[in-house]
Amino acid sequence: MKVKHLFGPAVLTLSLLVTAPSIAAPTEGAPILTGKQWTESDANLKKAYLLGMANLLQVERAYQQHKKQRRAPTDSQSLVPRFSKGLQTQTLDSVRQSLDNWYAANPSQLDRPVVETLWYEIVVPGTKQAR
């Protein structure tokens, strides 16, 4: 039960960290941080975003472990184990630096969401190296 109560605040915290007042634009639905906002943010804001992602994954992992008593998704149906495996050799600073490097090398891709870049450029290659 506690996990259900933590999920809402975790999502709210993540969305607040993602949108700094100076760069926030009115949107429909949840705001998605793109490379443009990422490259305009300082290192502390980037770390806060990554910590929010890590916390969200921890909450989801706890929720799934609680649901294993009932019907939880298998590892192949959940992103949590893949994120864990793909990021097991990374630190917050190395992920931040990898994202910085990727957006610097791909300036035409600044409209790409950071979570998409994190997944395809860091997590997926990390899962292949971890095998």
Image (cartoon, rainbow, N blue to C red):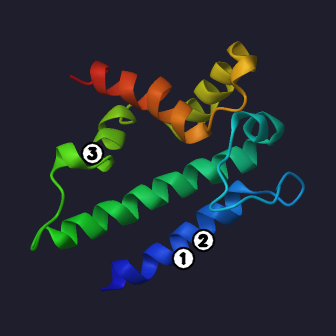
Residue at 38% across, 66% down = 59
Residue matched to label 2: 12
- In the image, residue 109 lies at what x, y percent? 68, 23
Q: Is residue 17 left or right of residue 86?
A: right
Between 71 and 101, the one nearer to me in the picture: 71
Between 49 and 114, the one nearer to me in the picture: 114
The mark nearer the N terminus, 2 or 3, is: 2
Q: Which mark is residue 72?
A: none
Compute the Cα span from label 2 to label 1: 5 Å
Q: Is residue 70 left or right of residue 31?
A: left
Q: Dividing the picture into quarters, in which one does residue 4 lie?
A: bottom left
Residue matched to label 1: 9
What residue occupies the far left of the structure in this picture?
A: 69
Q: Amino acid at mark 3?
A: Pro
What residue occupies the far top of the structure in this picture?
A: 105
The mark nearer the N terminus, 1 or 3, is: 1
* Label 2 element class: helix
Within-10-Å neighbours for mark 3: few <14, some 14–19, many 20+: some
Tell me the quarter of the image containing the N terminus. bottom left
Q: Amino acid at mark 2?
A: Leu
- Contact flag, marks 2 and 1 (Cβ < 8 Å): yes
* Label 1 element class: helix
Q: Dividing the picture into quarters, in which one does residue 108 lie?
A: top right
- In the image, residue 38 lies at what x, y percent? 73, 38
Compute the Cα span from label 2 to label 3: 23 Å
Residue matched to label 3: 81
